[in-house]
Amino acid sequence: MDLKHAPLDPADPDFSNTFLRLRKFVERQVGRAIGDFNMIEDGDVVMVCCSGGKDSYTLLSVLMALRERAPIDFRIVAMNLDQKQPGFPAHILPAYFEKLGVEYRIVTEDTYSIVKSKIPEGKTTCSLCSRLRRGIIYRVAREIGATKIALGHHRDDMLETLFLNMFFGGRIKSMPPKLASDDGQNIVIRPLAYVSERDVTRFARAMEYPIIPCNLCGSQENAQRKQVKAMLADWEQRFPGRIESLATSLANVVPSHLQDANLFDFKGLARPEAVEDGDTAFDAPELGMTSSVIPLAAVGRRAGREDFDTEAASSPVIL
């Protein structure tokens, strides 16, 4: 077996100390997310959706490594959907899964032809393709008895979605680390919720995964998402720590200091009642770092009020 693609061994001489530190950090971040959101429980069957991209490869490798020393027992099933896109190398993932020694399921559904017949030439196919793919994933999860569906979205995907919804949808909404599937039969989890795309990229490069291109269908990445991705990359370069602070804010929401009456009873608020974080009406906001005004013109003009959600207890932390 090619050790590059086997479950990671800290003593493996093929890996540098730098990579081993990265591996430990990524695994710790994934373990922390699993514990914080009770993503995986004893006896779970976790179906890991594998597209052949860096994110899903990393997710599968880390979950397999964590399972080896987890205080709970769970089963992993890798799943790939072959959508019959032209040029898709259908042999790569089965060979990889065999080499890895993981249980897997390859599903072939010609959604490519359906999408091409429904969407006019030149228009993005991602929305319809995503809905078709989601339905197939839920069906396969039921067939194999999966209790959790693991997706490879990372921290940066979640931040991009947050800003997409704010800029173009008028909503403060991101990707949840854990949610009930649309059919109510499964729990969808995102164990890479705390892992940055930069670390995923470094991890995947060191592991030399057999990456399958994501543009075989000919569809271009959503232009608005590209703009937001570029904005966040610029912030990360010019303002170190800003992205980490944004990610932390996702878990530190104060409804009483926003304007959503569904989350906080402003009308019913009586004079003697105190609210979370106290009275800050006459105080300057306390900031953890120097703030700067960032022009948002590059984000693009406002589109329709579309949700940019690509989706569709206390378990021990796995470290």
Image (spheres, rainbow, N blue to C red):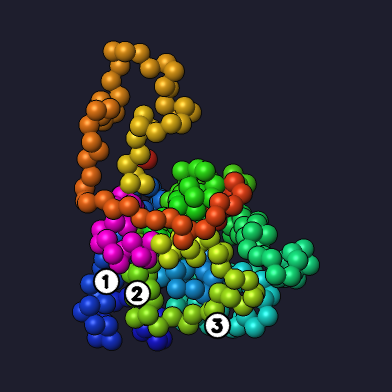
| Residue for badge 1 | 22
Give the magenta-colored segment's residue range.
232-248
Left or right of residue 250, residue 11 in this image: left
| Residue for badge 3 | 92
Amino acid at the residue labelled 2: Phe
| Residue 139 seen in the current view | no
Amino acid at the residue labelled 1: Leu
Check the picture and name the quadrant holding the N terminus.
bottom left
x and y percentages locating residue 100 in the rendered image: 44, 78
Left or right of residue 259, residue 47 in this image: right
Observer-side mark, 3 or 2, equals 2
Label 3 element class: helix
Q: Quadrant of residue 215?
A: bottom right
Amino acid at the residue labelled 3: Ile
Q: Is residue 86 above or below residue 38?
A: below
Observer-side mark, 3 or 1, equals 1
Quick one: 232 or 311, which is closer to the camera? Answer: 232
Label 1 element class: helix
